[in-house]
Image (tube, rainbow, N blue to C red):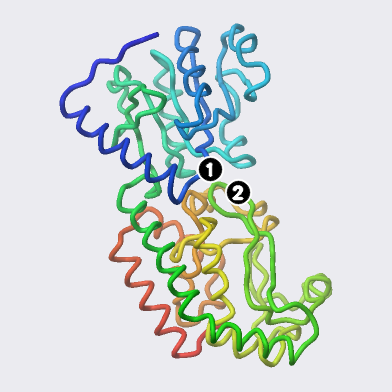
Amino acid sequence: MKILMTTPTMESKTRTNRTLELLRFQGRNSKPDKLMVIADEDHLDMIYEMMSQKKWGVQVAYILSDSPIARVLFPKHSRIYPINANIRSILRHDIIDEIVCCTASLPDEYLKELTDICQQFGVTLQILPYMKSKGIPVSGIRDIAGYLFLALETNPGKRFGYTLKSLAEQTFAASALLVLSPMLALIALLIKYTSHGPVFFRQKRVGLRGRRFYIYKFRTMVADAEKQKAALKELNEADGPAFKIVNDPRITRVGRILRKTGIDEIPQLYNVLIGDMALIGPRPMLPDEVYAQEEWHLKRLCIKPGITCTWQIQPERNKVPFNEWMQLDREYVENWSLGNDIKIFFGTFKSIFAARGA
């Protein structure tokens, strides 16, 4: 097994990184990171170490290797493809959090293409220290299974500040649900009394890296709203794969008020509490909407979806063209900061008080 030499600076950064990994694995991100590992025959032992213990917080979902030994060692653990497999297609249709290069060298053109792919999709790229000369813009250090990798971090989800943000949002969600519980109970009674059907609306959405989860809202439409959707497609006022009708005939009287004020979104604090969503982040979309998106749209999936976002606080958000909406989300991801999150947070309250919801 190879021993990687480290400098004092690398060791210091690694200790910080291990603290960060502990926060992720024990806190907001109890599900393991799904890896695509690119490996040559001399580094297959690294894959074995990554698979050996759950404490590393990773799952090797794909192995890209031209070594015939890889298929012998890992026939049941991962999907195994040759190194020249279509990585773009895999990232578009499956959940991959990081690409890890366990190899001494790769062709320059391959590495450049791999770097471009990771930047496009917002996937973190890990390389061994002695591959640094290949020109990859390294921005961090990652410790996986006791091995050090240099990281190209293309999304904010791996930063210490973003991890603290997530923990703070979960704390806020728990406190808010407790404080607002009397009001939420009253709203539940109004919904139940004024229209037939359940109090809460539950719908499958797409979250971090394409992971599916159920979003919760107060029901604002008639009970069979989803069955009526197909008949209303001609009234759709949104371009792209999104479905929006400003004066949707399926909305109930109480539901219209809840939507105007944004109160219907409050149950999503439960989604924040259990870690499926963030307080602030790109809005989660339906599976068929995500499937119809263009490749450059998909970087919005590299962080958890949120209750509110840049698009949500636009003065007339339902008139924002779909591609502009996607661009707003992409800019949010690429320029993420706590300061911008605070701006969106207070902008959301301004939007609520102006009753601009829909």
Quadrant for residue 24, please give it: top left
Quadrant for residue 289, please give it: bottom right
Q: Is residue 165 above or below residue 79?
A: below
Q: Can you identify the residue that label 1 sits on?
A: 31
Instruction: Tell me the kind of residue under disc 2.
Output: Arg
Q: Element at badge 2?
A: loop
Q: Residue at x 58, y 27 (%)?
A: 62
- Name the side, left or right, on which 129 lies relative to 327: left
Q: Residue at x 41, y 55 (%)?
A: 333
Sequence-first disc among 2 and 1:
1
Quadrant in which the C terminus appears: bottom right
Quadrant in which the N terminus appears: top left
- Name the side, left or right, on which 198 lies relative to 356: right
The image shows a total of numbered marks equal to 2
The numbered mark at residue 263 is: none
Residue in the foreground of this view, choosing between 111 and 63? 63
Residue in the foreground of this view, choosing between 322 and 278? 278
> Residue 288 placed where, x, y %?
70, 56
| Real-space CA distance between mark 2 and mark 1, rounded to the nearest whole angstrom | 11 Å
Quadrant for residue 10, please give it: top left
- Crowd tier of the residue under label 1, counting other residues whose Cα lies within 10 Å: few below 14, some 14–19, many 20 or above: some
Q: Element at badge 1?
A: loop
- Name the side, left or right, on which 130 lies relative to 29: left
Q: Is residue 106 above or below residue 136?
A: above
- Name the side, left or right, on which 231 lies relative to 258: right
The numbered mark at residue 211 is: 2
> Residue 329 placed where, x, y %?
46, 61
Determine whether label 2 and label 1 are within 8 Å by CB.
Answer: yes
Q: Is residue 340 above or below residue 222?
A: above
Instruction: Tell me the kind of residue under disc 1.
Output: Lys
